[in-house]
Image (cartoon, helix red, strand yellow):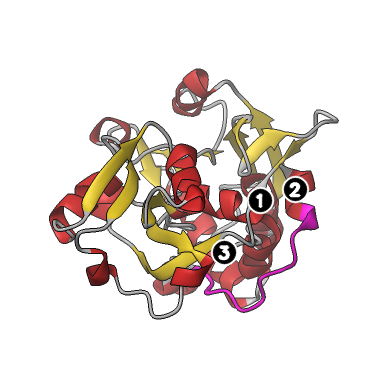
């Protein structure tokens, strides 16, 4: 994945994410309780956290964790765990924070607190390049629109665009390939996944219209989990996220890892 990303030109005109709570800038962290932040992660979530061909732990989350520690000026360790053990390791105090896309479910909420969202995952339409100009979702009434079967994005179309003809596919890639072949007029789904497909098919298609942020359907986005009650660590992370946005480091990471932006 890293090799593919390196070949893509930077998308300097992208819309850039900003989700950190600006009030966190006032919560200057007390560094006494946290001489270090022990981050836990996994190796199965590219491009966020995975091992490259040399076995090194890399990804957007890995770079972000290191930037957070540098901003707070504390020592930093990052340890990889299998996905099915990572949350238990955090609850057993084998780490201070888990940066691996742990969902904000009711069950997890009993064990963990969460940082501010640092990257939301919106839904977006993709069409062929010749249909991008003047795109209007309402004009898709009666048209075939690809979507992953049983997904929250299918529920979105059913609720907000009931007049489109939804065409279900088993995966996002199958639906996007249907746009490329002309079998459907558009695709709607997870914009982050689509961004990597578009990176490999730059002349075919593109994002059409706006990004749709619907937390009740698409989730709260990516956050960092900490053991419940560990407020010094959580406050330090939130404070660092605001600072990283203000000094441009968060934007730099986004442009590096997502050359085809999905906002």
- Which is more foreground, mark 1 or mark 3? 1
| Element type where label 1 sits in the image | helix
Within 10 Å of the Cα at label 1, are there few (<14), some (14-19), or many (20+) other Cα atoms? Answer: few
Tell me the CA gap for discs 3 and 2: 15 Å
Q: Which residues are magenta?
A: 6-18
The reply to whether the magenta stretch includes residue 98 is no
Residue in view at x 20 percent, y 46 percent: 155
Count neighbours of disc 2 (C-alpha within 10 A) and say few if under 14, some if 14 to 19, many if 20 or more.
few
When the figure is inspected, residue 139 is found, relative to residue 102, above or below; the finding is: below
- How far is mark 1 from mark 2, CA to CA? 8 Å
Report if residue 18 is visible in the image.
no
Q: Residue 82's spot in the image, x, y percent?
A: 57, 20
Residue at the image position 38 percent from the left and 31 percent from the top: 170
Residue at the limit of the structure toward the right, as seen here? 54
Task: Find residue 163 and report its horizontal and vertical position in percent.
Answer: 14, 58
Which residue corresponds to mark 1?
Answer: 200
Q: Which residue does the numbered mark 2 point to in the structure image?
A: 4
Earlier along the polypeptide chain: callout 3 or callout 2? 2
Q: Is residue 122 left or right of residue 32?
A: left
> Could you tell me how many numbered marks the image carries?
3
Q: Is residue 140 left or right of residue 61?
A: left
Q: Is residue 193 above or below residue 88?
A: below
Write down the residue under mark 3. Answer: 261
């Amino acid at each position: 994945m890293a090799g593919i990303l390196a070949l893509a030109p930077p998308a300097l005109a992208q819309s850039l994410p900003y989700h950190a709570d600006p009030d966190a800038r006032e919560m200057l962290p007390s560094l006494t309780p946290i001489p270090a932040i022990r981050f836990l992660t996994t190796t199965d979530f590219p491009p966020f956290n995975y091992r490259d061909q040399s076995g090194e732990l890399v990804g957007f989350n890995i770079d972000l964790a290191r930037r957070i520690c540098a901003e707070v000026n504390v020592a930093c360790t990052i340890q990889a765990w299998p996905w099915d053990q990572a949350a238990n390791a955090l609850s057993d105090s084998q780490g201070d924070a888990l940066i691996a896309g742990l969902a904000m479910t009711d069950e997890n909420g009993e064990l963990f607190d969460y940082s501010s969202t640092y990257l939301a995952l919106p839904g977006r339409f993709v069409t062929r390049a010749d249909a991008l100009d003047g795109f209007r979702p309402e004009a898709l009434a009666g048209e075939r629109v690809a979507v992953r079967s049983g997904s929250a994005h299918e529920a979105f179309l059913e609720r907000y665009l009931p007049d489109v003809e939804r065409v279900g596919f088993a995966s996002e890639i199958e639906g996007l390939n249907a746009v490329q072949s002309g079998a459907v007029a558009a695709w709607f789904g997870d914009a982050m996944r689509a961004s990597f497909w578009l990176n490999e098919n730059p002349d075919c298609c593109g994002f059409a219209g706006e990004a749709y942020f619907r937390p009740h359907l698409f989730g709260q986005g990516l956050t960092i989990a900490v053991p419940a009650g560990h407020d010094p660590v959580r406050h330090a992370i939130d404070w660092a996220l605001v600072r990283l946005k203000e000094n441009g480091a968060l934007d730099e990471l986004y442009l590096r890892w997502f050359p085809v932006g999905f906002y």
